[in-house]
Image (cartoon, rainbow, N blue to C red):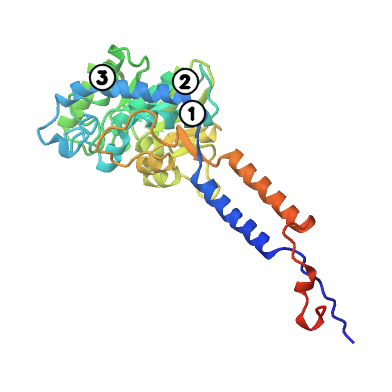
Amino acid sequence: MTRIYWSFWKHSSIAIALLALFAVLGLIATESFKVKKEQPYFKKKIHAAKLAERAFQVLRSDLLKKKKPDYKDWDPANTGLVGEFLSPVTSNTGSLSSKQTSVNPNFAAVILHLLKRAKLEEGDTIAVAVSGSFPAMNVCLFAALETLKLKPIIIASTSASQFGANHPHMLWLDMERILSEESVFSVRSTHASLGGTQDKAIGMSKEGKDYLLTGIKRNKVIYIDPLSFEDSIKKRMDLYQKLSAGKQIKAFINIGGGTTVLGTSLGKQVFKSGLITQLPDDINPPDSVIKEFLQRDIPVINVIQVESLARKFGLPIAPKKTPKPGEGKVFVQEEYNPWLCIGILVFLSMGLYGITKLGWGGNQTDFQLPETIRRK
């Protein structure tokens, strides 16, 4: 014979319902009343962004002098840092939206964030590759380097993709020189190649190549003339080693999608934007400068896929006005208020203990029994 044991319900349904209601209200409160928290290296990030903004302003007048009347169709913010649709020194197609997105001084803070993630400290020697494709991003990189007081070895690719620094008389090397002469930055490229296909601007007109060579000479930068794609990689690696003067290169940072640096179209798929610390296990990427550094266990910061990078750090896509320094999740993020969370948790714990152990709001047991066995 099976016996049924009756367990009396001694807790107040109303009290439990009220406690559940408070729990729901507490959840709403924690989501609604978040606090803004400054991210690590906040002051340095602000400094870098303001320095980049100053560089933008210094370049603006010289850049706008070179622009065509319909220029604002490409650059609604009127920054001057979005280049031509096509010119003799244009090496490849380019995304207008990406170029517009890159004109944001707060990318200096993003790059500084990545440099600190790579554990770089003041005085560290790093290898740098820039191209004319993203002049605004180059500016942001230089601002971050100056802020952290790093020692960069910079090699440039002179040509540019669409909407980059592709005016024949205002190449990226010209912008570097202006910023140096105006004492905005102390760092500059020491060497430069033509860039483009195989780092030799293959497919570009003779006129375009002549403009690039003249620009390299005009800015007193040493010309790199590789024999082939493989030779370009070797020459760059040899230069980085030579110019480091025996000091350890602590990181390599790349701006843009240079073929020699990334290694053909496959390299652009394998090496995503951000900090890279090792080669992938499941694929053998093509030869490239990035691959060479990773094989030597040197971390790489790869700045490509600009719009994706902007979304990750809360920066606007193709803004109509140039953002001000300090905007974006790289500076401040909303987080749960710890004191509010603790307060709600303590209240719920006390309420639950009071109801279950102390009998707060408890019902009379008699009225929890079946009607047939209640006292008369």
Q: Which residue is mark 3?
A: 58
Looking at the image, which is closer to me, 60 or 165?
60
Q: Position of residue 298 (x, y in %)?
A: 53, 31
Q: Residue furthest right?
A: 1
Secondary structure beneath dot 2 equals helix
Front disc: 1 or 3: 3
Which mark, by number, is residue 280? none
| Quadrant where the C terminus is found in the figure | bottom right
Three-letter residue code for mark 1: Leu
Three-letter residue code for mark 2: Leu
Which mark, by number, is residue 115? 1
Q: Earlier in the sequence, mark 3 or mark 2?
A: 3
Side of 167 where 142 appears, left or right: right
Side of 163 where 26 appears, left or right: right
User: Mark 2 touching mark 1, by CB under 8 A?
Assistant: yes
Q: Earlier in the sequence, mark 2 or mark 1?
A: 1
Secondary structure beneath dot 3 equals helix
Q: Which residue is mark 2?
A: 148
Marks 2/1: CA–CA distance: 9 Å
Q: Quadrant of residue 352?
A: bottom right
